[in-house]
Image (cartoon, grey):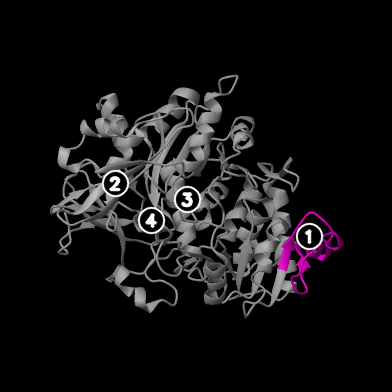
Amino acid sequence: MLTGHASTTGDTYPLNVTTMLRHAARTFPDTPVVYRDESGRRRRSDYGTEWARVNRMAHALEALGIGAGDVVGVMDWNSRRHLELYFALPGLAATHLQLNLKLSREDLGYVVRHSGARWIVVDESLLPIAESLQDVEGIDGWIILSDHPAGEVATSLPHPVFLEEELSRAPDGEYEWQDIDEKTAAYAGYTTGTTGRPKGIFYSHRSVYLHAWALHTSLSFTHRDCLMPVTPMFHVMTWGFLHAAVLAGSKVVMPGHYAAGDVGDLAECLVDEGVSISNGAPAIWTPILEHFRNRSAAANLAGLRVVVAGSEPALSLMKGFKDVAQVDIVHGYGASETSPIVAINWNLKSTLKDMSEDERWDLKRSQGLPSPGVDVKVVSADGVEQPHDGESAGEIYYKGPFITQEYFDRPESADAFDDGWWKSGDVGVIDPHGYLKLTDRLKDVIKSGGEWISSIDMENAILDDPRVAEAAVIGVPDEKWDERPVAYVVAREGSPVREDEVISLLSARFASWQLPDRVVLVDELPRTSVGKLNKKKLRADYTA
């Protein structure tokens, strides 16, 4: 690293997460923060009120003995208190550990032990999960989030304290916030892959702050926007969207606890509150689209941009939302290791304005343009960096200020990194315009007769049929060809689809040797704890 002339700017001023909320409270104190109480009713607060509560929360948590270097696990929905903990805990130089509610009891116990968590904060509705962790060694205390008095909450947790009672005893004055070394871990999360134990990633104040700025730039967050984060807050900090919204002073709507099968209220909240930015996996937005299709009065949500990630959104989903409610479905891409958003496909580059409509829709399938400040390269199997020609494929590597460079206390995973680069395991290309397009996962590429077949491209082709709700394509062992593709298809309710119709659909886009040997019609597909297709389970369960 070269060093030149010394600067005279505030390079020692640390980038601290809590200062985001302080700025929002001072500059936009009346901007609404909407949340749900435990009965599900919408309540209203604002940045000024939230900052006052975060100050009291810091006093209360410090009085309990929580401070610099402590790891505090949090089990909660997308709630008001969860938002406040997002800023109060890092403001003490403690680390907010995101506990994924969809992990198994065994994996949750591992995460708590491996991270060194001393305290667990848990919403009252999630007490059974917390109580199953009582035997995990090293936990000093339990903090319960509830609207009810302590005497009305039954739990077997030893000597719990109740956050609202602690807040009622805390001083009203501003907490004496200290500057925190920006390399201190503000948050921690654990990957939820389909193999092995979850791997820990500790996110610094600096990385979270810079990721928020990158997201702010890529999606044009402003104080005129309204964010409703649908992605769970226990999953990679709801993709950094809350931080970007607070940084911009945007209105925030916390949806609370919701179920994928009951999205009516979630959908109507988009309309009622004027939401202009949201996020989530395609699995949650597909039923929301169906809700708007069946709505008695048409909904106009023009200006709403929804970033979907986890899997490539089907063209039918993107076109459907645009036709039904003027919603722009934006393809985003990232991973726990990238904080997570590392590419977004929003606002076509002005140099491509002459593209046809079909070309524009096809380009929207790509993962988009890399985030500001992030280096991306495509590396072939023999380690050669590939040109940006849209054809030369390889594994995608990332390096940057919010890209992970190691897993916490997992030296055996060092081969996932190369001289500061994280090796994503995704196969893709970068076109001459700079757009990133994934073609598969290394482990999911189907190798048949010495040639590669992209499972992602085949899945998306199947999903172009409006009768199809979900699709997954896997490679299964074959004595002659090494592997052959098999497609699993879930039809929409009331829209049956036959195996021969799927094959006919694919024949228009794939060579005959690439077509799946079987199409299996199923009622649902297995998914991981964060909603991704669990192809490992499909391969393990497959029988010819």
224 above or below 95? above
Q: Earlier in the sequence, mark 4 or mark 1?
A: 1
Distance between the alpha carbons at the discs numbered 2 and 4? 12 Å
Q: Is residue 159 magenta?
A: yes
- Classify 10 Å Cα crowding around label 2: few (below 14), some (14-19), many (20 and above): many
Question: In the image, what residue type sits under mark 4?
Answer: Asp
Disc 2: which residue: 486
Element type at mark 2: strand
Instruction: Tell me if I can see residue 342 in this picture.
Output: no
Q: Earlier in the sequence, mark 4 or mark 3?
A: 3
**Magenta residue span:** 143-170
4 or 3: mark nearer the eye:
4
Element type at mark 1: helix
Question: In the image, what residue type sits under mark 1?
Answer: Glu
Question: In the image, what residue type sits under mark 2?
Answer: Val
| Label tally | 4
Q: Earlier in the sequence, mark 2 or mark 3?
A: 2
Q: Earlier in the sequence, mark 1 or mark 2?
A: 1
Disc 4: which residue: 541
Q: Name the side, left or right, on which 36 lies relative to 382.
A: right
Q: Position of residue 311 (x, y in %)?
A: 39, 46
170 above or below 537? below
Which residue of the protein is positioned furthest toward the top in this rendering?
Answer: 297
Q: Position of residue 16 (x, y in %)?
A: 54, 63
